[in-house]
């Protein structure tokens, strides 16, 4: 009976790993947005394997190590490959023969692999750390992965773009006439499909994972407002941001930009901003 009880959280962890492996397959079969969705599926299993382990009292060293190995694939390798492919595609090189890609373009795309490299370092540091009971040190690997996962979802489901070809202003203008986008929408599309946006995002996310900066976590010890005001403030901001992002699905307001799925990377940005503000005010 004890063996079965201990196996349940490990099974959920393996489902996290399966999500990552399947996402890697989809990355190279013109389904990057579904690969991105599998990061969220893996995150679901990653959340519940720990919760189930606590409820069943089934913590084990094997479970801890297995969790890190699964996270390395789903939240390290998979987002690194998604970003790698987006950088290549933004330069017009997705699915091109390796020989046809210039060394500079390939090297630029390889910057995306900082995510799995520093993600592995972050997970190793987390496993041996004893001072992350109340808050994280550096952003967690799932947060960095979610930021990256939001990008193909935005391009595919919000802007209806072909993820596997280079984009142009002319393409955006043509689409704007079909979907009634304004100049703000076109500007956002130019921004989120720019090669340097992808490169800088990967570098910054990778550094944030290993920087010794406290990051807000949701490990509530109690529900007292005084002790959790930054957590509550962030959750309220998340709630309002999501409403603002999808307000156009309820009623159209011309002066409000079309955010929708862009809210995914924005929420990770808000997490970093809230953490920086908390650290600044706490130090004072």
Image: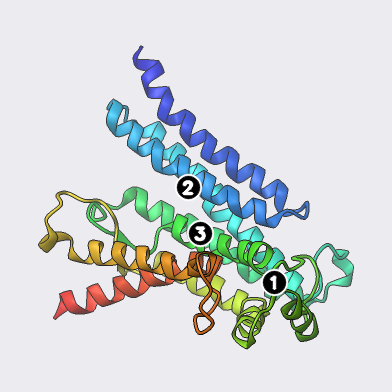
Q: Position of residue 41 (x, y in %)?
A: 53, 45
Pick out the residue farthest to the bottom.
183
Sequence-first tag of 1 and 3 = 1
* Frontmost residue, 246 versus 252: 252
Residue at 48 percent across and 29 percent down: it is 11
- Mark 1 crowdedness (10 Å alpha carbons): few <14, some 14-19, many ≥20: many
Instruction: Give the side of residue 104 with respect to residue 5, left or right.
Output: right
Tell me what residue is drawn at x 40 percent, y 33 percent.
Answer: 63
Marks 1 and 3 sit apart, C-alpha to C-alpha, by 17 Å
* Residue 68 in the image, given as x and y percentages of width and height: 45, 44
Residue of label 3: 146
Relative to residue 262, is residue 74 depicted above or below? Answer: above
Circle count: 3
Question: What is the distance, in whole Å, between disc 3 and disc 2 at their CAs?
Answer: 9 Å
**Are discs 2 and 1 less than 8 Å apart at CB?**
no
Image quadrant in which you'd find residue 261: bottom right
Q: Residue at x 25, y 67 (%)?
A: 233
* Residue that carries the numbered disc 2 in the rendered image: 43
Would you say residue 215 is visible in this rendering? no
For the view shown, which residue lies furthest in the front direction? 251
Q: Position of residue 6 (x, y in %)?
A: 37, 23
Kindly indicate whether the residue at mark 2 contacts the one at mark 3 (C-beta within 8 angstroms): yes
Q: Which residue is mark 1?
A: 87
Give the quarter of the image for residue 52.
Answer: top left
Tag shown at residue 177: none
Does the CB distance between marks 1 and 3 fall below 8 Å? no
Image quarter of the N terminus: top left
Please, is residue 118 above or below residue 266 in the view? above
Mark 1 vs mark 3: give the one in front: 3
Sequence-first disc among 3 and 2:
2
């Amino acid at each position: 009976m004890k063996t079965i009880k201990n196996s349940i959280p490990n099974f959920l962890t393996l489902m996290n790993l399966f999500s990552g492996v399947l996402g890697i397959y989809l990355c190279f079969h013109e389904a990057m947005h579904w690969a991105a969705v599998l990061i969220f599926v893996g995150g679901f299993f990653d959340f519940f394997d720990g919760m189930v382990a606590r409820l069943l009292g089934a913590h084990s060293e094997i479970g801890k190590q297995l969790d890190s190995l699964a996270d390395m694939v789903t939240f390290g390798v998979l987002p690194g490959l998604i970003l790698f492919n987006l950088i290549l595609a933004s330069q017009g090189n997705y699915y091109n023969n390796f020989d046809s890609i210039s060394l500079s373009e390939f090297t630029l795309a390889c910057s995306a692999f900082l995510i799995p490299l520093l993600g592995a370092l972050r997970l190793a540091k987390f496993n041996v750390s004893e001072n992350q009971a109340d808050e994280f040190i550096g952003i967690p690997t799932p947060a960095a992965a979610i930021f990256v996962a939001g990008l193909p979802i935005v391009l595919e489901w919000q802007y209806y773009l072909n993820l596997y070809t280079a984009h142009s202003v002319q393409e955006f203008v043509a689409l704007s006439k079909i979907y009634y986008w304004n100049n703000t929408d076109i500007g956002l599309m130019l921004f989120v499909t720019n090669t340097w946006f992808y490169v800088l995002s990967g570098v910054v996310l990778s550094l944030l994972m290993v920087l010794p900066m406290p990051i807000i976590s949701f490990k509530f010890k109690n529900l007292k407002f005084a002790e959790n005001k930054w957590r509550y403030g962030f959750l309220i901001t998340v709630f309002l941001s999501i409403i603002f992002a999808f307000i156009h699905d309820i009623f159209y307001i011309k002066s409000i930009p079309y955010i929708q799925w862009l809210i995914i990377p924005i929420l990770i940005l808000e997490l970093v901003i809230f953490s920086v503000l908390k650290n600044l005010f706490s130090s004072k």
